Image (tube, rainbow, N blue to C red):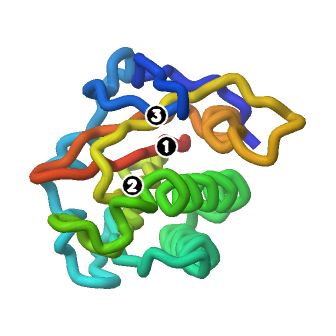
Amino acid sequence: MTGHSAQESVRGTSAWGWTSSAAVASGVPQSWWLSALRHGAPRWGALSGSASHDSASWRLEADPGAVKVARELALTVLREWGMSRMAGDIELVVSELVTNALRHAGGYLAGSSGYENVIQLSVLRRGGEVVCAVRDGSAQLPARREPDFMAETGRGLHLVSCFSRTWGAVPTIPDGKFVWALFT
């Protein structure tokens, strides 16, 4: 467990804890993954299971089973890369990111005009760093809120910030966003 606090790159929380303001990796030095998420190989239209030595990307159906599939895919890639020491933290964060995409982008994933009924998991590495990113078709960006431990929801991004080095969101073209988490 890394336990590092996150650099909050998303501001302007709405009542639902989501925002539509631009999110960038402000304060995150050398954000090598942002260009890859915006424009690089792991794109929305990437083939299922496409991989190279430093990235892997999958399209997942927008159903609750996607959470388990995403965890298994991420863990398989980590084992292949010899980075199993990060498995516990990444497994939890990938679960939270996919769950958030299913829950908060549900209206956008339900076959609305202009949106695909899929989410995308991308895992990228450079040296000892790994970035896990989940894309959905919604333009609303996430914002961490103080968790209410009596409520059934609202703790996901708090967990993401506790188990990753930092996290953020980046809008993608033509629509949607990636929510990413960095691990070292």
* Mark 1 crowd level (few <14, some 14–19, many ≥20, 10 Å Cα): many
Res. 76 in view? no
Of tags 2 and 3, the one toward the viewer is 3
Q: Is residue 83 above or below residue 127?
A: below
Quadrant where the image shows the N terminus = top right
Kindly identify which residue carries mark 1. 181
Give the mark, 1 or 2, whose residue is nearer the N terminus. 2
Q: Amino acid at mark 1?
A: Ala
Residue 16 lies, in percent from the top left, at 54, 34
Closer-to-camera residue (71/53)? 71
**Residue at the spot x=35%, y=77% of the render?**
59
Closer-to-camera residue (23/128)? 23
Q: Residue 125 — which label? A: 2
Residue 132 lies, in percent from the top left, at 46, 54
Q: Is residue 119 above or below residue 171?
A: below
Viewed as shown, does residue 57 lie left or right of 11? left
Give the mark, 2 or 3, whose residue is nearer the N terminus. 3
Closer-to-camera residue (63/54)? 63
User: Mark 1 near mark 2, Cβ–Cβ under 8 Å?
Assistant: no
Q: Secondary structure at mark 3?
A: strand
Kindly identify which residue carries mark 3. 18
Q: Amino acid at mark 2?
A: Arg
Q: Amino acid at mark 3?
A: Trp
Measure the C-alpha gap from mark 1 to mark 2. 12 Å
**Residue at the spot x=25%, y=51% of the render?**
176
Using the rendered view, name the quadrant where residue 150 is placed: top right
Viewed as shown, does residue 114 lie left or right of 130? left
Quadrant where the image shows the C terminus = top right
